[in-house]
Amino acid sequence: MSLYKRNSVWWMRFTHNGVQHRRSTETEDRKLAQRIFDKLKGEIAEGKHYGLNIEKIMFEDLRRIL
């Protein structure tokens, strides 16, 4: 799990259920990006449902669900 900068926006890289994900924090503020990332890590650690963003679903995601 890591936080990295792409252009001026901070991105998160993490693995969930064996699948690597990269997702934008949609912020240029490092501290805010870290808080967003920490919240996500906490949700994953607690086993809360990690929903897919319907706008970003890929065919492979759908195939895996079905």
Image: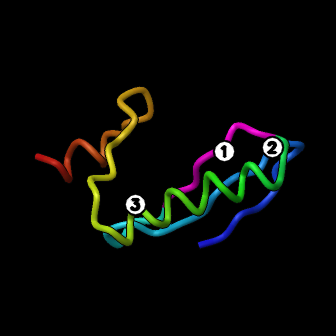
State how far apart marks 2 and 1 are (Cα).
Answer: 7 Å
State which mark lies toward you, 3 or 1. Answer: 3
Q: Earlier in the sequence, mark 3 or mark 2?
A: 2
Check residue 43 in the rendering and tell me which mark sits there, or answer none. 3
Find out whether the residues at labels 3 and 1 contact each other: C-beta distance under 8 Å: no
Q: Position of residue 45 (x, y in %)?
A: 38, 72
Find out whether the residues at labels 2 and 1 contact each other: C-beta distance under 8 Å: yes
Task: Tell me where residue 17 sits by quadrant.
Answer: bottom left
Residue 65 within the segment the image draws in magenta: no
State how far apart marks 3 and 2 are (Cα).
Answer: 22 Å
Check residue 25 in the rendering and tell me which mark sits there, or answer none. 1
Residue type beneath disc 2: Val
SS at mark 3 in the image: helix
Q: Earlier in the sequence, mark 2 or mark 1?
A: 2
Left or right, 7 with respect to 37, comes to right
24 or 58, nearer to the observer: 24
Residue at image coords 72%, 51%: 33
Task: Tell me where residue 8 sits by quadrant.
Answer: top right
Q: Position of residue 61 (x, y in %)?
A: 29, 47
Q: Mark 2 points at which residue?
A: 9
Residue type beneath disc 1: Thr
Please determine whether, in this image, residue 47 is positioned above or below residue 32: below
Number of residues whose C-alpha sits closer than 10 Å to that of mark 1, classed few (under 14), some (14–19) or many (20 or more): many
Q: Earlier in the sequence, mark 3 or mark 1?
A: 1
Q: How is the image coloured?
A: rainbow
